Structures are given as C-alpha cells and as structure tokens.
Amino acid sequence: MSERPLRVVMLIESVRGGGAERFTVGLARALEGPGCEVVVCASRDPGRNRDPIDHETGVRVLMLGRRRTLSPLAWLPLVRYLRRERVDVLHSHMFGSNVWGALLGRLAGVPVVIATEHSWTYEGQRLRKLIDGLWVGRLSTAFVAVSPEDARRMVELERVPARKVRTIPTGLLRDPDELRGAPGRLRDELGLPPETPLVGAIAMLRPMKAVDVLVDAFARLLGRVPGAHLVVAGDGPLRGEVEARIAALGVGDRVHLLGVREDVPAILRSLDVVVLPSDSEGSPIALIEAMVAGRAIVATRVGGMPMILDDGRCGELVPRRDPQALADAVAGLLEDPARRAALGGLAQRRALADFTLEGVARQWQALYRELRG
C-alpha cells in the first residue's frame, strides 16, 4: 500500500507581491504531485472566491480576507480546514504569518509547524526579535532561514533555539531557457547605440534595495566609463527621492527608471553588468535570475549573496553603502569583457546546478518528511 501524500498548507498574507510571495506560490506549484498535496492560504487577499486566484497562480488558494492585524475570528476557516483535512504541515512565510502560524498550527493539532523568514535586517525592532525568539522559534517545529547568515543572526541576535534553525535557499522561478535565450533589445528601446555600456538593476525602489547608493556609484563610474548608461527596472515609494538624487547629480540623461516591467529576461540579457546594491538581502530571486541569464554581477556582501555567488567566485562582492567600491567594481568589469564573460559563465553554471526551483523543492519535501517522521 502506497503512503498517503503529505498534506501541506502554506500560509502567507498575499499571493500577489514581491519575491517572497512569488517564491511561495512557485514552491507550492513545484511541490504539488503524487507525494505532496499543497494549498496556499492567503490571509489578507480580499474575498473568499477562490477560483480567479487559483487560475492566476496555478495552485489551490484558501482566501481569508483578513482586514486587521488583530482579527482572531478571521482565522477560523483556516483552523477548521487544518483539522478537517488532517493537514501534516503548516508552512508559514514572513513575520506576520509566522506569528499566527505558530499559534494556529498548535491549536489545530498540526504535527509539523514550520516558519520561514525570507530576510530582514535584524537591526532595531527589539519586539520583533523577542517574538521571533520567544514565540515563533519555540512554538514552531523548525524555523527556516534562506541563507547561512540569516540563520546565524536568528540564533545569535534573536535567541532562536539552534536545534530549530534550518537553512534552505530560494530558487529560480522562471524557465531557464527564457532567461538564457531572451533577446536583449533594451538599447534599441532607449535609442542607444549597440556598443553603449549598459549597467542595470532589477529592484523595488524601497530603502533596503539602496538604489540611491547605485545612483551615487554610477555618477562616479562616469569618470572612468563616460559612455555608460544605467537602467533600473522596478518602482516603489522612494521613486521621488531617487529622481531627486539623479537630478542633483546631473545624470538624468544617463539614468533610465523603467518602472515595473514584465520583460525581465530581455532586460537582463541587455545588460553588461547587473548590480545588486542592497543594504540587506536573504536569498534574492533577482540575483539567481541574473546568474542564469549569464550576466556579470556586482553585489553587496550582505545576507545570502556571498553564499549564492560562492564567496565572490561567480561575481564581484563589495561592502554595503560604499558607492566608490561599487563604482570601481562595475568599471573594472565594463573595461574587461573577457572577465565579464567568464564570471557570467561561472554564475550561470552555479545557479543551474544549485538553485533551480525543483532542487529547492526537493529539499523542502525532504524536510517535511523528516519532521513528520
């Protein structure tokens, strides 16, 4: 007699959003199969009509329509579902869902309760550290970090029990062939000559992404590579501040804020150097996508990026908030096409070997079964 598939509920506030939301939905799709039945619970997405969301995401979605942070009654449909379906694993993602998931999983008698932190700075926010350490870390069966650095900070700064902490990175969500084969036509769109050195970032315009530092670095870069242009694909609350900084530095004719774009593979394939100037990161999907696209990469030495880039063997690493170091690293790659190509090839091979979604999903399923026993 074959064993019963694991019944898994993934808990997150929304199935629409940034990297963590995209990864949660992608992981659910990758896990669904003969050995695993997965439902995603979106606690804050409005309404309870599941069909449109199911169609959009490709996974089954339980929508709670929760509107307030403290709304215990809104969680009753999930508790009833966990009990009725005899769910084996409740797997939450990000702080708010981790807090509720740790409690609701225990109240519903779920055998395995897993919390996942997709990264934060671990700076300030004393209450959050206490909650992670004293509540989530102790009520959960396991508390999973997306990088070794995040795992270290969970134990040392938040006092999460070390025996509870595991590390599993995020994985590639797009089709590798799309990233490797997309036509790089961004120069044509921007009206730039084919030989124009093009530097870029795929980033939300919010504080942790440090696009302001990238703009400062680019202004310095022009002293060595005067023909270079910078593109940023993404939008966010700091757009006005970034635009003001661009104007103050007098580089408005060389910096292109593209806004939110759906053609990320084509943008990546157009770039000579991809930059991730972040102040903090976990295991960023944008980095993995740039690697699969075969791009030369400059990233800050924060979070999981040194691990993903094999401690600088597959890309240049620089200190955070150091625009001169960032400018020097990018300029060095723009001036050395052979090194750009070599780093791009190394990065691509590493990403395809270690960070595919299928490989990451196997790690998650193995953890589920280990903890379920």
Image (cartoon, rainbow, N blue to C red):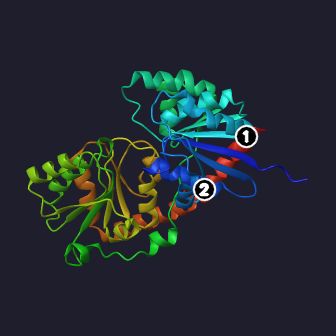
Frontmost of labels 2 and 1 is 2
The spot of residue 301 in percent (x, y) is: 37, 45
- Report helix, strand or loop for mark 2: loop
Q: Which residue is mark 1?
A: 88
Residue for point 43% across, 50% down = 17
The spot of residue 356 in percent (x, y) is: 56, 59
Residue nearest the viewer, comparing 298 with 76: 76
Looking at numbered disc 2 in the image, what kind of residue is underneath it?
Val
Position of 180 relative to 213 (above/below): below
Residue nearest the viewer, comparing 88 with 159: 88
Q: Is residue 38 left or right of residue 26?
A: right
- Report helix, strand or loop for mark 1: loop
Rendering quarter of residue 192: bottom left
Position of 347 relative to 362 (above/below): below
Q: Is residue 278 left or right of residue 44?
A: left
Residue for point 12% across, 59% down = 252
Labelled pair 2, 1 in contact (Cβ < 8 Å): no
- Marks 2 and 1, the one that precedes in the sequence: 2
Looking at numbered disc 1 in the image, what kind of residue is underneath it?
Asp
Q: Which residue is mark 2?
A: 59
Residue for point 15% across, 68% down = 227
